[in-house]
Image (cartoon, rainbow, N blue to C red):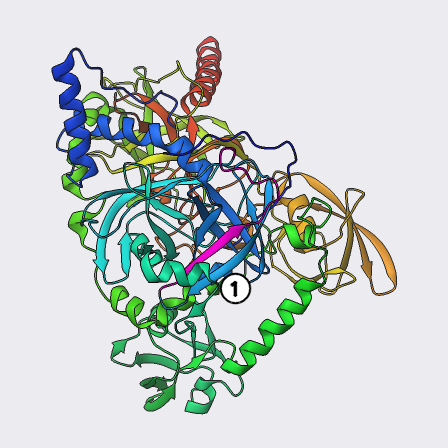
Amino acid sequence: MLNRVQHPGNRAVAAILLVLGLITAPSVHAQDGSDDAKVKGRIQKLINGQQPRSLEDVVAMEEQVTKLVPDLMKATVGIRVGPAQGSGVIVGTEGYVLTAAHVAGRPNRRAFIILEDGTAITGETLGLNNTIDAGVIKITQEDWDPNKWPHAEIGTSDDVKLGQWCIAVGHPGGFQPDRNPVVRFGRVIHKYHDVVTTDCTLIGGDSGGPLFDLTGKVIGIHSRIGPELTHNVHVPISAYKNESWDRMLAGERWGDSPKAPFIGVRGSSEENDCLIAEVIEDSPASVAGIKANDVIVKFADEKISNFDSLILAVGIRRPGEIVDVVVQRGEEEVSLKLTIAQAGGVAPEENEDAEKEDAEKENKDNGEKPDESDDSRNRLPLQPQLVRERGEIAAEQAVDLSLQSVSWLRSIMMLKPAGLYERNHVTIRQAFDKVIEKSGECTVRITSGKQSLALGTIVSEKGYIITKASQLQGDKVRDDIECVFADGSKRPIEITAINEQHDIALLKVNGRRKLVAVQIADDVEIPVIGSWVITPGLSSTPLTIGVVSAKPRAIKGGLLGVLLGESDEAVFVERVFPGSAADRAKMNRGDVIQSVNGKDVANRQMLIDLVRSHLPGETLKFQIMRGEEEIEINATLGRESDVFGSEALPRGDIGGPLSERRSGFPAVFQHDTVVQPNECGGPLLDTNGKMIGMNIARAGRVSSYGLSAKIVAEIVAELLAEAESDENTDKDE
């Protein structure tokens, strides 16, 4: 197990880039020695990979996970090594940190390790096995004390079984001081040579983080996100042992460094075909004869239906491969041959020169750990909440996706996920059927014509339902809004009140019908990370299952809507997105942003942090240099939906569209259930069938948000009072 930690008082704010239930976890109470033995036997079977066969199994698993999670989070750290950032895990008492090779970069580099509470300690990168993406860092902090710092125990991956349950921890999207290391829960999908894949949802920033078994031991290290939500790659812990371990501790680097494939075209995911908008000069595509306005219909042996399918087809190729490409050029079909290049077009010897330059830059640093005043080193260089451009985001995540060209990874990516072993397989969800028996009638579906808008939660027998308010807006919504009940019957509904702050609408069912209101849990306010959350649909089996991933926090996320550039002297606007707050405020390309609300802007990340700390609708004062003129601009922050709508970011947010309203919440908890935007508005249940929250947004690949039962209960009381007051007024008139 892990040593509990008493952290030193000094804290450093750090952000790392590549990286609720309100009811206490139900306990299995032993009545006597015999019952206790049964519980232990049940847990052991689950640890060994047996699927839960009953609600009792589900509860026993929850108890085991919630018991482990606090210590697992303490051992999980954020890592920054030069420009590369990710996650890691402290193992043993000698101060070694396991991470991914692509996070560490190369041996003998200074590293910063960020603990759960934000404390930054120093380290040095050791050896790397690039072939399998394994790396080690040694903590060099002078006051390192093995009895003081948290650490995890290394397990074994040799006997990992398909379907075995596992816990993934890391810092998706980067270390955030107000968010704990994020917990996800899943099963082993494939075991293939030096690769383990699971359906634990991962994203950039998780790289290098730990995969635990249900005893709390490390069995793998996160390496790459896969092309599907249920297909994420981990380095098995056995790869760090034996000869590899000794070589890495000795500072040796070996294996072929994986290179990202590159062809040099740009296009749009919004097109219905693979229309090429631009061909980069002297790129492989240009040399092959591909032209702007060509439509790629075949790449290698794969049919290409849109630009995203081209991305995936290129992603599994290796630099140097020659592939056949077929393009539609007007009425003519043209066959071409294209040689895949390495992203960046850098030769190995040039890479070595680049590394030397990086080392020289690092040597200029004074060796002190980062502090809050050094934002250029401490903070995340790009936050999608402020800037989201396809090309920029793809570049940000390229490190995490580049290894798709490695032979072993290429092989594993071509395997289809074994659905039988997925956490959300129907045989698993059926173990939760008893939960739905208790509360299944409390969920409805909100529709408009043939459009499914959202799920709804019945909160009153008098005909009142709550749902996600923003899902009832837009062109897809007509006047004939209806709710569909579990038995298939329909009733017209009307909107009676809205809470804009929390994005909740109160609906009233027209017509007589006996409704069953959800039971709201209201006795516990502190979330239990790792506890089950169950999303019911209209069937007798849960729609999805998952676990609480992070404690409640505010998601402010005001959007300015610019692409930022940064020089040694200034932070400037490279692009203004149409329809954004910056566009409405008449910001221009080339504007140099000097201050926000009177606070000087030292670098790009400081500006991003200042903006995202405010809610949509707040007005900020920007001091700007435009040429030789100093001007003042007031910009009222918007939302991501102003610019990006409900689109998911390519490759980084694989899994479908996002909610248009996915920020501006005063307090939400995060869970690892993947819900679609039209599945928000329904209840989140615990294993007792009580409502512990309400799904309020799908915010990203690994980010689904829920409002706590306490907040929901307070809002429902206010909205019901408002609705009943309006009804009484109408009667009086």
Question: Residue 277 or 374: which is nearer the viewer?
Answer: 374
Which residue position holds label 1? 107
Residue 331 placed where, x, y %?
A: 34, 88
User: Where's the N terminus, which quadrant?
Assistant: top left
State the residue lying farthest toward the top. 732
Residue 217 placed where, x, y %?
A: 32, 41
Instruction: Specify the principal SS of the magenta part.
Output: loop
Q: Is residue 7 magenta?
A: no
Q: Is residue 99 visible?
A: yes
Helix, strand or loop at label 1? It is loop
Question: Residue 389 or 82: which is nearer the viewer?
Answer: 82
Q: Relative to residue 558, is residue 330 depicted above or below?
A: below
Amino acid marked by disc 1:
Pro
Left or right: 476, with 384 as reference point = left
Residue displayed at 62% across by 44% down: 142
Residue 441 placed where, x, y %?
A: 22, 24
Left or right: 108, with 443 as reference point = right
Residue 278 placed where, x, y %?
A: 50, 79
Q: Relative to residue 356, is residue 240 depicted above or below?
A: above
Which span is picked out in magenta? 132-148
Residue displayed at 45% across by 79% down: 342
The 10 Å Cα crowd at callout 1, few under 14, some 14 to 19, many 20 or more, is: many
Marker count (numbered)? 1
Q: Is residue 400 visible?
A: no
Residue displayed at 49% across by 46% down: 95
Which quadrant holds residue 350? Answer: bottom right
Q: Relative to residue 531, is residue 331 depicted above or below?
A: below
Residue displayed at 61% across by 45% down: 14
Which quadrant holds residue 44? Answer: top left
Q: Is residue 138 magenta?
A: yes
